[in-house]
Amino acid sequence: MKRKTTFSAIGGYQPFLFAIGMYIVALFFSIFICSAIFNVLHPKKSVASTETVKPSTENANILLTVAQK
């Protein structure tokens, strides 16, 4: 007895294909999560270096006033 279609045979693989699909999605997102954690723990040197900014003496004595009507 011959089968008319092969579509019903593909339905038997649904749990297997679902598991593979979820594995690929989880692997894809874990790459971004792990890279984000790595970048937090090991920042780039240009971002990590903090320079102390000395205040300018030219504009140090400015007084700001706000007038109310």
Image: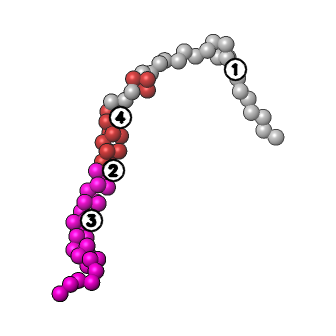
Residue plotted at (48% across, 18% down)? 52
Alpha carbon of mark 2 to alpha carbon of mark 3: how far? Answer: 17 Å
Q: Residues within 10 Å of mark 2 (few under 14, many from 20)?
A: few
Judged from this view, the residue extending furthest toward the bottom is 1
Residue plotted at (26% across, 56% down)? 23
| For residue 66, side relative to residue 52 (left or right) | right
**Disc 4 residue type?**
Asn
Marks 2 and 3: which is nearer the front? Answer: 3
**x, y percentage for residue 2?**
20, 84
**Disc 2 residue type?**
Phe
Q: Residues within 10 Å of mark 4 (few under 14, many from 20)?
A: few
Which colour assignment does the render follow? secondary structure
Work out whether mark 1 precedes mark 3 in sequence or the reverse, and give the earlier one: 3
Q: Residues within 10 Å of mark 3 (few under 14, many from 20)?
A: few
Position of the C terminus, as image quadrant, is top right
**x, y percentage for residue 12?**
21, 74
Alpha carbon of mark 4 to alpha carbon of mark 1: how far? Answer: 41 Å
**Disc 3 residue type?**
Phe
Marks 4 and 3: which is nearer the front? Answer: 3
Which residue is the site of mark 3? 18
Q: Quadrant of residue 6?
A: bottom left
Q: Quadrant of residue 55?
A: top right
Judged from this view, the residue extending furthest toward the top is 57
| For residue 54, side relative to residue 32 (left or right) | right
Give the main secondary structure of the magenta stretch. Answer: helix
Which residue is the site of mark 2? 29
